[in-house]
Image: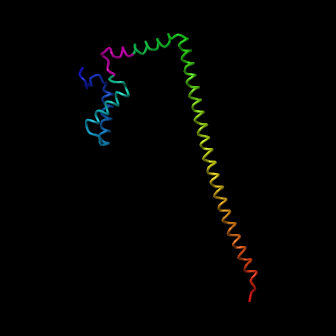
Amino acid sequence: MPRGDKSSYTDKQKRQAEHIEESEKDEGRSEAAAERIAWATVNKQDGGGKKGGGTRKATKKTAKKATTKKAVKKPATKKAAKKTATGKATKKAATKKAAKKATTKKAVRKSAAKKVAKKTTTGKATKKAATKKAAKKTTARMAAKKTPAR
């Protein structure tokens, strides 16, 4: 069967590809691009042509069964070793995450402390300015009171 032959696809798959191709053309894709996208979508959904007549399907099923049997036959020691390795990896990852959180928290605290310090220094400067103004006002009032009215 040459490449690009669609004989192994069912009528339903062909209809689906045609419908997808039309919608892709409506979106402004070229004829070739729309066809490529349509068949790629059908292949992704169904895993290729579904029509029988070859040994391909049988090999797929037997391959799946063989892999499941191998998984069952694994010795318990290998599984246990794998679990402990996974546990160690997760512990390391958790420790890294905790360390990262701690450093992030420290950075946040430092920046917050800097902001507070900045505010207090700004506040002190404004307080000084306000007291200077108040002092000027009081001296002006005092001077006004001391001078006799004529």
88 on left or right of 9: right
44 in relation to 23, above or below: above
Tell me the residue at 57%/32% (across/down). 97
Relative image position of residue 136 (x, y in whole percent)? 69, 72
Residue farthest to the left, as pictured: 2
The quadrant holding residue 92 is top right
Residue range corresponding to the magenta coloring = 50-60
The quadrant holding residue 137 is bottom right
User: 15 or 102, which is in the foreground?
Assistant: 102
Tell me the residue at 73%/79% (across/down). 143
Residue farthest to the bottom, as pictured: 150
How are the colours assigned in the image? rainbow
User: 146 or 91, which is in the foreground?
Assistant: 146
> Is residue 53 found inside the magenta-colored segment of the image?
yes
User: 79 or 150, which is in the foreground?
Assistant: 150
Tell me the residue at 32%/23% (across/down). 49
Tell me the residue at 36%/14% (across/down). 59
72 in relation to 39, above or below: above
Report the quarter where the N terminus lies: top left
9 on left or right of 114: left
> Is residue 11 found inside the magenta-colored segment of the image?
no
Report the quarter where the C terminus lies: bottom right
Relative image position of residue 144 (x, y in whole percent)? 73, 80
88 on left or right of 67: right
Relative image position of residue 123 (x, y in whole percent)? 66, 59
